[in-house]
Amino acid sequence: MAAEYGVDNPVPPWKTSLDGMCDALDRARCAQGVPDFAERRDAEDSLSATVYAGLPYPESQLVALAHTMVARGVIDEAELQQRMDSVRARLEA
């Protein structure tokens, strides 16, 4: 994907934030619906190998995490869309 968009660094700038989010989720085991480390990684591996097999890494990790959080009711699709729209607006400003 980096070559397609002419990006020299194949690791996107949001990867650090994604890693931080995953670390925070791994420590939030007590929150309802939040998967623990093993559950999150198992879901990520499964979704990345099937539903999101056509996406490169780390994009597949990001989409698999969003998928898992919506499926578990941690965030709903409307809230996820609102947050994505907010991020897009900041990036395009």
Image (cartoon, grey):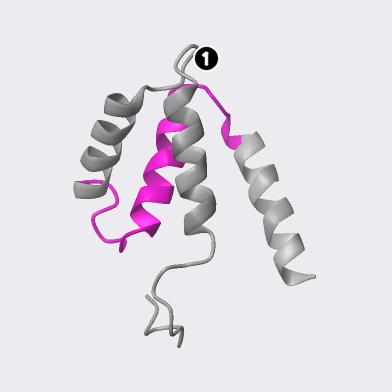
- Residue 60 belongs to the span the image colors magenta: yes
Residue 29, relative to residue 66: is it above or below? Answer: above
Instruction: Identify the residue at image location x=50%, y=55%.
Output: 16
Residue 84, relative to residue 39: is it above or below? Answer: below
Residue 3: x and y, percent?
37, 84
Instruction: Identify the residue at image location x=37%, y=75%.
Output: 1
Instruction: Identify the residue at image location x=61%, y=40%.
Output: 80
Q: Which quadrant, please, contains the C terminus?
A: bottom right
Residue 6: x and y, percent?
45, 88
Labels in figure, total = 1
- Residue 70 seen in the figure: no
Instruction: Give the residues drawn in magenta, as a range.
Output: 50-77
Side of 14 where 22 appears, left or right: left
Which three-letter amino acid code belongs to the residue tagged 1? Ala
Instruction: Identify the residue at image location x=47%, y=29%.
Output: 25
Depth order, front residue of 43/30: 30
Depth order, front residue of 67/57: 57
Q: Which residue was labeled with disc 1? A: 31
